[in-house]
Image: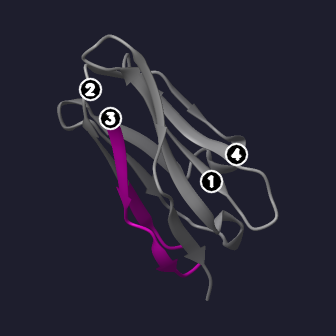
Amino acid sequence: QVQLVESGGGLVQPGGSLRLSCAASGSIFSIEIMAWYRQAPGKERELVAAKTSDGSTNYADSVKGRFTISRDNPKNTVYLQMNSLKPEDTAVYYCKAGGLRFQRTYFEVWGQGTLVTVSS
């Protein structure tokens, strides 16, 4: 079993910052990709940022220049630093990870989600 535990959500004023964390645990041989998605009320889940094991990153256009994804590979942890937050960033943020178990079988798991609310 591979599990993800997220933390760091909360209420922040427009223009403020938050940092989300997501730690993976379990039968992990390697993690190829870690990513953050978000889902706002009434909208589909969308990719926010992703980072592969070789360091490649991908960001949604709406967060470029404001959000930064980083990884601590020895700790199997991914972070999302969110700056200059806007009300439209309000959503439940989900962590996702994909990789190989010790048994060399592929896994893809989601975290439970953490709510980010940007409001004055």
Marked residue nearer the N-terminal end (4 or 2): 2
**Where residue 92 sits in the image (x, y, percent)?**
59, 63
3 or 4: mark nearer the eye: 3
> Mark 1–mark 4 contact, CB under 8 Å?
yes
Residue 72 visible within the image? yes
**Quarter of the rendering containing residue 26:** top left
Relative vertical location of residue 16 with respect to residue 61 in this rendering, above or below: below
Return the residue at label 3. 1
Return the residue at label 2. 28
Q: Nearer the viewer, residue 24 or 50?
A: 24
Query: Where, quadrant-wise, is the C terminus in this rendering?
Result: bottom right
3 or 2: mark nearer the eye: 3
Q: Residues within 10 Å of mark 3 (few under 14, many from 20)?
A: few
Q: Nearer the viewer, residue 46 or 3?
A: 3
> Mark 4–mark 2 contact, CB under 8 Å?
no
- Measure how far apart labels 2 and 1 are at the Cα level: 25 Å
For the residue marked with disc 2, what is the amino acid? Ile
What's the residue at 28%, 13% (across, down)?
Answer: 103
- Label 3, secondary structure: give it: loop
- Measure how far apart labels 3 and 1 are at the Cα level: 24 Å
Marked residue nearer the N-terminal end (3 or 4): 3
- Which portion, as a residue range, is magenta? 1-20
Instruction: Answer whether residue 5 is magenta in the image.
Output: yes
Return the residue at label 4. 46
For the residue marked with disc 4, what is the amino acid? Glu
- Measure how far apart labels 1 and 4 are at the Cα level: 6 Å
What's the residue at 75%, 68% (across, down)?
Answer: 41
**Quarter of the rendering containing residue 78:** top left
Instruction: Answer whether residue 80 is magenta in the image.
Output: no
